[in-house]
Amino acid sequence: MNISARNKLIGKVKKLTVGVVNAEVIIALPGGGEMVSVITKASAKTLKLKQGSPVVAIIKSPDILLAVPCGNPECKCK
């Protein structure tokens, strides 16, 4: 697979939950992190995803938002 996207994360499917239309894929990343992707049920079937399948998460977005806690002890933004 060759692709021009620079934001790629290699991992393995930790959990696959298939619904009526979409599938939620929890991806285990090296180092212990996780990320979640929601794809169509048809795409999950086409990719033959199952627990343990190796995957590459390709992140395509013109913006990446960052936030920091505001410091207010009553705020729930921690």
Image (cartoon, rainbow, N blue to C red):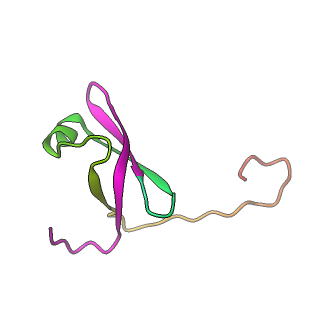
Tell how many labels: 0
Q: Quadrant of residue 17?
A: top left
Tell me which residue sits at (86%, 52%) in the image: 73
- Asked if residue 15 lies in the magenta stretch, the reply is yes
| Percent coordinates x, y for residue 75 in the rendering | 79, 49
Residue at the extreme front: 52
Query: What residue range appears in magenta?
Result: 1-27
- Left or right: where does residue 32 sit relative to residue 23? right
- Asked if residue 23 lies in the magenta stretch, the reply is yes
Q: Quadrant of residue 44?
A: top left
- Left or right: where does residue 38 sit relative to residue 3? right
Look at the magenta stretch and give its main secondary structure: strand
| Percent coordinates x, y for residue 21 in the rendering | 26, 29
| Percent coordinates x, y for residue 23 in the rendering | 31, 36
Residue at the extreme right: 73
Tell me which residue sits at (21%, 75%) in the image: 4
Tell me which residue sits at (81%, 60%) in the image: 71
| Percent coordinates x, y for residue 1 in the rendering | 15, 67
Task: Pick whichever, 40 or 51, lies toward us.
Answer: 51
Q: Quadrant of residue 40?
A: top left
Tell me which residue sits at (35%, 70%) in the image: 7
Position above or below: 55 against 19: below
Residue at the extreme top: 20
Task: Pick whichever, 67 or 12, lies toward us.
Answer: 12
